[in-house]
């Protein structure tokens, strides 16, 4: 198997992560009107329930030092065979405690202090200096606390204690009802404070946060008005919720500045001014024009910073930055003319479905922001522009990455597999409301998803009304993913604003008796009303490490008694091409009404996940991904890259290092060409002009001989794409490659460095059929997290791991101590390989790490 060229991958990752926020090293002596602190470093943790741990004077010195995002299930997940109905059966579910000590400057006295969490799993009680301050329960949305009443300022310590419960039997305190999405199978359970945490200080007159749970506030809402695409200009509307906690009446004026990605002000306008009574909250609005606008698009995901400023008597009292993009959207029905339109242009949405936990083997849900961004960059490297998050709302860090890289999102609230009633329905509505408020400024979200299955007409009306209440100007639509309840689907046809389907393309959708007849959410009537989007096709599974039926050491996949699928990497690619082709020829822009259906296509999953796998005899996670659990590409990644590429592309499926005497069919995936020629050692084996399933050019009975295997795609006789495989020699060396954030591994207790280890021949070529144990020794201030062998139990968190197809990847996590870290890999019969790095210190001032006033801009275009 071939990865992206290592140098190109590293360069892309480094270019990508260079745009992420870099936090300031030292605290500022004077506080600005609004300041954000990174609250991730410096927590104490224990994985058990401890009486009295909420008390400020409790002795936590023996607890572990951790940084958030953190999960206690990084040590016990991915270690048992996966179960379809129960997910990961080996993880701890129970209570854990976190405590954090910090001080606030004396100058913060009289101001407001807020704790913002991007979420945790599942529920938590919060104590501030011994006083119960909050309760978080839904396990999905952001959560906020106004800490002001509980805090000390100056030289006195503050202590936040958080009791977290990740049991899937957790019941809501007020109702005794279990949240529907509390499921390991559909929503992998990584207990702990597993997302980012920040602490904010504002003045007593301030713009609120878009965090409804805990704060009941809505923040700033920014949206385009009267877009003039031809004139490259747009109106911009702003609504900012403002709170006066000054204790006296105040006349507050709103103004707006729009900054481009270089920080230059491109527009400025004044908004409303109003007199606020003490303790009054209301919304101020503003509108103005942005000339020479650059519109957000999947191919040009341009973002602006909208800076909203409050002034009292001419003095600035608050300033808030919102990163957003402006785009015109249209959601159309109609054979040949329907679909999703961005900025007046039809866009074929193509990509993947993914669990919202977006987990990483060996780390779970707790890994640093730069890795989320690298993951999004890899999605775009496959020429995907669409992701449907499954069952629960995505994490903020993933939404922001999709904004930056031009990946359209389907954003759910929280559910499992069916409509619900009573309190469970109310819980879903509340989470949908909170999610809309949190993400309505993110241009990459086009679809709000009200359910993973069809819901009742009354429930659909309620969800559409929710969108119109909280996101009336965002250019988005509300719908559901439909299942097999055709009668219920028919009843919501004239209510839903788009229609999601699962495995929708089927001979039965091609032979419906009339326009209103429905199968799996599809009907011609629906096709003519609004976009139909595929949400999760291709449910098959295959390991990255099993090439085909001819490659050692496995010589094919050997299905166990509880396995559903019998695929290797090669046959998985062929099935993927077949399904993608069936949707491609039935795209909504096909003018033939008999073959005009789909506006989007998502294949399940993007990455292998600790979820509801069906290879229950063979795999420790679900292996439906196009990349594996540590984001190493499978062959399917390259096939999707070819199929989704708008330009000519080609990929030889497999490798060219077979046992002597091997004779097999060689498959080449190619696109935007009319012929593919295959050659061995420069000798042509012929040309194929008719692909199977639209993309696969098959060359049967190819006899292996060492050397080169070359494929050339041509169009009208001109070469448009080319790839060559070279036979590797016997294993001669180990090669280690380091991936970190720019500036290196931060000693903050949560940062991660990734190390790829390969077995290569004497000329540095990876040995593609190598699968052998590599042992590791590590020294220095670091925590070993290891990697994954998807077909072996208990493979994570060990100081050894097998290569798969000649390569694998391990992770190490930083501690709070900076220093030199050495990793040495050894393998029988090969010389050892050593990698040395230094973790860099992070200055934390009494538990606080200041962040810059505003994040650096995202790239205007994608790296090549």
Image: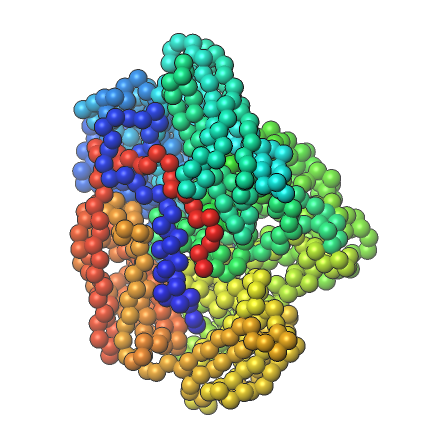
Give the camera-side residue of 662 and 138: 662
Residue 290 x, y percent position in the rendering: 54, 34
In percent of the image, x 46 and y 48: which residue is there?
860
Q: Is residue 154 visible?
A: yes
Residue 706 x, y percent position in the rendering: 42, 87
In percent of the image, x 70 and y 60: which residue is there?
586
* 821, above or below 401, in the image: below
In percent of the image, x 30 and y 40: which residue is there?
23
Occupied quadrant, residue 377? bottom left
Residue 811 x, y percent position in the rendering: 31, 57
Give the camera-side residue of 531 and 275: 275
Give the camera-side residue of 334 and 274: 274
**Where the N terminus falls, by quadrant?**
bottom left
Occupied quadrant, residue 114? top left
Q: Is residue 134 visible?
A: no
Residue 519 x, y percent position in the rendering: 72, 53
In percent of the image, x 55 and y 28: which residue is there?
288
* 279, above or below 507, in the image: above
* 617, above or below 358, in the image: below
**Where the C terminus falls, by quadrant?**
bottom left
């Amino acid at each position: 198997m071939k990865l992206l060229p290592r140098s190109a991958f590293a360069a892309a990752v480094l270019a990508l992560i260079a745009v992420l926020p870099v936090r300031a090293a030292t605290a500022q002596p004077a506080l600005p009107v609004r300041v954000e602190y990174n609250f991730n470093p410096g927590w104490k943790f224990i994985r058990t329930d401890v009486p009295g741990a909420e008390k400020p004077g409790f002795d936590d010195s023996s607890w572990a030092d951790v940084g958030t995002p953190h999960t206690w299930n990084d040590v016990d997940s991915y270690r048992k065979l996966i179960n379809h109905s129960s997910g990961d059966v080996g993880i701890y579910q129970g209570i854990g405690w976190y405590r954090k000590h910090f001080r606030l400057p004396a100058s913060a006295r009289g101001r407001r202090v807020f704790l913002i969490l991007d979420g945790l799993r599942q529920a938590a009680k919060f104590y501030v200096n011994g006083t119960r301050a909050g309760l978080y329960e839904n396990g999905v949305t952001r959560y906020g606390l106004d800490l002001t009443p509980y805090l000390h300022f100056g030289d006195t310590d503050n202590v936040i204690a958080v009791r977290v419960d990740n049991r899937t039997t957790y019941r809501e305190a007020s109702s005794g009802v279990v949240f529907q999405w509390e499921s390991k199978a559909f929503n992998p359970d990584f207990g702990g404070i597993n997302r980012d945490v920040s602490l904010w200080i504002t003045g007593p007159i301030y713009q609120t946060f878009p965090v409804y749970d805990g704060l009941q506030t809505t923040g700033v809402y920014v949206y385009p008005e009267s877009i003039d695409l031809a004139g490259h200009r747009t109106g911009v509307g702003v609504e900012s919720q403002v709170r006066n906690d000054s204790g006296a009446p105040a006349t507050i004026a709103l103004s707006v500045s729009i900054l481009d990605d270089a920080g230059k002000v491109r527009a400025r306008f004044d908004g409303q001014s109003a007199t606020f009574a003490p303790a009054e909250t209301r919304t101020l609005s503003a509108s103005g024009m942005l000339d020479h606008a650059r519109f957000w698009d999947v191919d040009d995901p341009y973002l602006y910073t909208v800076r909203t400023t409050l002034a009292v008597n001419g003095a600035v009292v608050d300033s808030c930055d919102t990163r957003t993009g402006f785009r015109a959207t249209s959601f159309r029905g109609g054979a040949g003319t329907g679909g999703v339109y961005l900025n007046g242009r039809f866009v074929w949405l193509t990509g993947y479905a993914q669990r919202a936990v977006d987990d990483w083997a060996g780390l779970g849900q707790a890994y640093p922001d730069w890795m989320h961004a690298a993951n999004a960059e890899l999605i775009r490297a496959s020429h995907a522009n669409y992701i449907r998050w499954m069952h629960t709302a995505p994490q903020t860090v993933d939404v922001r990455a999709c904004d930056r890289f031009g990946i359209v999102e389907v954003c759910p609230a929280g559910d499992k597999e069916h409509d619900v009633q009573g309190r469970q329905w109310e819980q879903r509505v509340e989470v949908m409301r909170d999610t809309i408020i949190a993400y309505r400024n993110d241009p990459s979200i086009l679809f709000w998803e009200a359910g993973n299955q069809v819901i009742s007409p009354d429930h659909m009306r309620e969800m559409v009304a929710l969108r119109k209440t909280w996101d009336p100007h965002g250019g988005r639509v509300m719908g559901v993913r439909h299942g097999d309840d055709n009668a219920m689907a028919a009843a919501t046809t004239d209510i839903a604003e788009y229609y999601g389907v699962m495995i929708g393309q089927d001979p039965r959708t091609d032979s419906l008796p009339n326009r209103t007849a429905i199968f799996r959410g599809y009907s011609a009537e629906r096709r003519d009303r609004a976009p139909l989007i595929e949400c999760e096709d291709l449910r098959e599974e295959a390991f990255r490490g099993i090439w085909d039926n001819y490659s050692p050491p496995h010589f094919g996949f050997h299905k166990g008694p509880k396995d559903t699928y019998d695929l290797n990497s090669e046959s998985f690619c062929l099935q993927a091409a077949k399904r993608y082709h069936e949707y491609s020829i039935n795209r909504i822009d096909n003018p033939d009404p008999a073959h005009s259906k789909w506006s989007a296509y998502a294949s399940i999953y993007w990455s292998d996940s600790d979820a509801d796998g069906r290879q229950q005899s063979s795999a420790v996670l679900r292996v439906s991904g196009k990349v594996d659990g540590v984001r190493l590409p499978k062959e399917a990644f390259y096939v999707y890259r070819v199929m989704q590429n708008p330009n000519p592309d080609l990929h030889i499926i497999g490798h060219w290092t077979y046992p002597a005497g091997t004779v097999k069919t060689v498959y080449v995936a190619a696109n935007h060409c009319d012929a593919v020629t295959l050659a061995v050692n420069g000798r042509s084996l012929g040309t194929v002009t008719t692909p199977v399933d639209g993309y696969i050019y098959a060359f049967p009975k190819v006899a292996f001989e060492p050397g080169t295997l070359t494929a050339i795609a041509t169009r009208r006789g001109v070469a448009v794409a080319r790839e060559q495989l070279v036979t590797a020699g016997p294993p001669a060396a180990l090669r280690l490659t380091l991936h970190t954030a720019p500036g290196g591994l931060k000693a903050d207790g949560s940062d991660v460095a990734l190390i790829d280890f390969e077995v290569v021949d004497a000329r540095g070529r990876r040995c593609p059929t190598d699968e052998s144990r590599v042992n590791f020794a590590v020294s220095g201030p670091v925590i070993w997290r290891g990697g994954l062998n998807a077909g072996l139990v208990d493979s994570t968190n060990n100081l050894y791991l097998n290569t798969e197809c000649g390569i694998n990847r391990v992770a190490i996590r930083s501690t709070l101590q900076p220093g030199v870290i050495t990793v040495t890999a050894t393998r029988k019969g090969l010389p050892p390989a050593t990698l040395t790095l230094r973790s860099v210190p992070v200055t934390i001032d009494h538990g606080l790490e200041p962040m810059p006033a505003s994040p650096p801009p995202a790239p205007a275009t994608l790296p090549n």
